[in-house]
């Protein structure tokens, strides 16, 4: 088969590799019909994750068809259409039983495209398949369905749920990239009074306004007004930038919540000299994807308008082009890049 293989920092090649096979009785092999490129893939390619060894197939999100299952896979069968979750879950350890699949202690967690071969390929081996793949029902666009592999669960679990978004809330989302805009879309399910999206890129602010933000602006008067006034009930940090985190601490109200989604590659200053009296709750977390089945039903009902988040589509064999477009998102306007089998 063909796959995108990591050979070291700044070295990825779309090349021929052996087809995956069942290695454990709990595995399934899935034909990849759609996959994506995300920010962590770019960081791997830069060399930011030394645990990723040369020779690893990248990618951790997919939709596809089951072609083979191991003897201990009971919920899937060949021919099933599935969402392959970015997080693998053994389903039996204490963390998995509590729904914290991202913290799996028995060989799961974020392993696809990280510790084992991933989804940016024609086929992928899915470990712990019963707990790491969701049956895909309904007539959904494959480009939308693949967002359920990681993007939408991250927005919900780490942003909206951890931030305790509720009816009548003022929500500020800092960072109008894919996960920030997805957080805004999911937050709308909880009837907030208003959602404010902040970013430096005009094109992304235009998308935010089109998708449903009440206000979309660069950091400025709105944030200053929130800082000087009652503040936001929930601030969701989705930029991964230290200044974005500081902006959240300024915007949040007394007793409010800061939900950090952004992946920070360096330190972010925590201004406890101004926060200690505000009773602010700060949450972090890795996605578990335990919410994927629920979000799938919401999407099927038509209440997750995520189609505008997919700005570019490519054939699988144009993987390297997709990386370049996604990496140059400020110029290309790329949000979510999806690659589909042709």
Image (tube, helix red, strand yellow):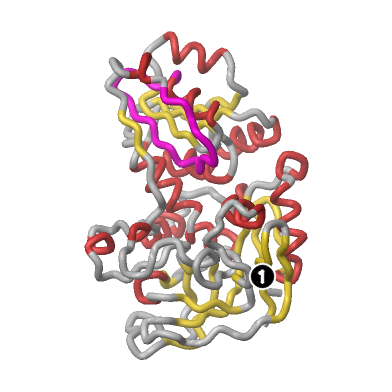
Query: Helix, strand, or loop for circle 1?
Result: strand
The residue positioned farthest toward the top in the image shown: 228
Please give the residue where the numbered disc 1 appears in the rendered image. 5
Q: Residue at x 33, y 63 (%)?
A: 104
Against 303, is 145 above or below?
A: below
Q: Residue at x 54, y 74 (%)?
A: 64
- Indicate whether residue 256 is drawn in magenta: yes
147, 138: nearer the viewer:
147
**Is residue 157 depicted above or below 93 in this figure?**
above
Q: Specify the segment rendered in magenta.
A: 250-270
Q: Position of residue 304 (x, y in %)?
A: 48, 49
Q: Residue at x 57, y 39 (%)?
A: 211
> Is residue 85 something that shows in the picture?
yes
Q: Is residue 176 left or right of residue 254?
A: right
Residue 288 magenta: no
Side of 316 relative to 117 (left or right): right
Horizontal and vertical percent position of residue 196: 51, 27
Q: Between 25 and 31, which is closer to the camera in this rendering?
A: 25
- Locate residue 201, reporting x and y percent: 68, 31
Rendered-image quadrant of the N terminus: bottom right
Q: Is residue 252 above or below residue 293?
A: above
Q: Nearer the viewer, residue 170 or 126?
A: 126
Q: Residue 307: in sight, yes or no?
A: no
In the visual, does 20 lie left or right of 13? left
């Amino acid at each position: 088969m063909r796959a995108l293989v990591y050979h070291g920092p700044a070295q990825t090649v779309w090349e021929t590799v052996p087809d995956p096979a069942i290695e454990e009785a709990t595995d399934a092999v899935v034909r990849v019909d759609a996959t994506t490129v995300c920010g962590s893939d770019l960081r791997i390619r830069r060399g930011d994750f030394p645990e990723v060894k040369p020779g690893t197939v990248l990618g951790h999100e997919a939709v596809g068809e089951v072609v083979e299952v191991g003897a201990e896979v009971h919920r899937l069968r060949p021919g099933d259409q599935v969402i392959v979750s970015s997080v693998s879950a053994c389903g039996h350890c204490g963390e998995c039983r509590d729904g914290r699949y991202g913290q799996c202690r028995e060989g799961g967690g974020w392993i696809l495209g990280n510790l084992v071969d991933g989804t940016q390929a024609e086929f992928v081996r899915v470990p712990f398949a019963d707990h790491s793949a969701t049956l895909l029902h309904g007539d959904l666009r494959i480009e939308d369905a693949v967002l359920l592999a990681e993007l939408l669960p991250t927005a919900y679990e780490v942003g909206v749920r951890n931030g305790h978004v509720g009816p009548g809330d003022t929500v500020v989302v800092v960072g109008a990239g894919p996960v920030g805009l997805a957080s805004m879309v999911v937050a709308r399910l909880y009837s907030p009074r208003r959602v404010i999206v902040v970013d430096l890129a005009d094109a992304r602010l235009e998308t935010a306004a089109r998708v449903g933000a009440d206000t979309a602006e660069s950091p400025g008067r709105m944030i200053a007004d929130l800082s000087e006034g009652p503040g936001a009930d929930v601030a969701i940090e989705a930029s991964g930038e230290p200044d974005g985190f500081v902006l959240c601490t300024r915007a949040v109200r007394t007793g409010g919540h800061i939900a950090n989604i952004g992946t920070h590659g360096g330190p972010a200053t925590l201004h406890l000299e101004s926060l200690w009296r505000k009773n602010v709750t700060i949450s972090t977390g890795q996605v578990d994807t335990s919410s994927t089945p629920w979000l799938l039903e919401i999407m099927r009902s038509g209440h997750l308008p995520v189609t505008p988040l997919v700005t570019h589509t490519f054939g699988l064999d144009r993987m390297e082009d997709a990386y370049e477009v996604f990496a140059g998102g400020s110029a290309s306007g790329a949000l979510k890049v999806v690659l589909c089998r042709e």
